[in-house]
């Protein structure tokens, strides 16, 4: 008999699929919102800070048509808001409502909050 040689060849095929990748950068601006809040004192608190009895221009009335009346009440100062009648305006130096031809209401100036 003749000797036989058996050769086994194993071939391994490997397939690799590469998926292309892309890289991108997105810039998103950051926005912020600031809300301003206005706090208004009550007439009584305003008068307590003022510390004096009398009539005073309302601090937030651009038309000069209202005023605070500060008065003594139970050992401390209290306050009420009053409105001038018709087309009259409050004149601080005489603490009374007068015709608008008698007193020119000053320009109302606001200061924005930074």
Image (tube, helix red, strand yellow):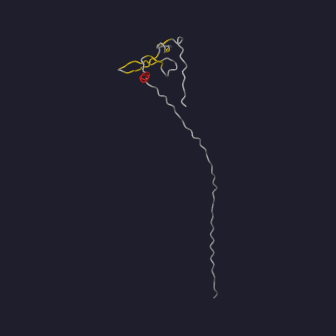
Q: Which residue is drawn at 63% across and 75% down?
A: 9
In this picture, is 6 found above or below 27? below
Q: Which residue is drawn at 63% across and 78% down?
A: 7
> Which quadrant is home to the N terminus?
bottom right
Image location (x, y in percent) of residue 67 = 46, 18
In this picture, is 35 found above or below 77? below
> Which quadrant is home to the C terminus?
top right
Q: Nearer the viewer, residue 23 or 38?
A: 38
Image location (x, y in percent) of residue 48 = 41, 23
- Among all residues in the image, which is located at the extreme left? 74
Q: Which residue is drawn at 49% across and 30% down?
A: 37
In this picture, is 87 found above or below 111? above
Image location (x, y in percent) of residue 45 = 42, 24
Image location (x, y in percent) of residue 112 = 55, 28
Q: Which of 12 and 82 is in front in this view?
A: 82
- Among all residues in the image, which is located at the extreme bottom? 1
Q: Which residue is drawn at 63% across and 51% down?
A: 23
Residue 9 relative to residue 49: left or right: right
Count the marks: 0
């Amino acid at each position: 008999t003749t000797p036989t040689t058996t050769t086994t060849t194993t071939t391994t095929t490997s397939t690799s699929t590469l998926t292309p990748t892309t890289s991108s950068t997105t810039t998103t601006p950051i926005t912020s919102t600031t809300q301003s809040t206005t706090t208004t004192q009550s007439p009584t608190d305003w008068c307590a800070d003022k510390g004096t009895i009398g009539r005073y221009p309302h601090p937030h009335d651009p038309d000069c048509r209202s005023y605070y009346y500060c008065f003594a009440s139970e050992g401390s100062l209290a306050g009420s808001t009053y409105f001038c009648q018709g087309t009259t305006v409050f004149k601080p130096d005489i603490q009374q409502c007068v015709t608008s031809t008698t007193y020119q209401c000053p320009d109302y100036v606001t200061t924005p909050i930074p």
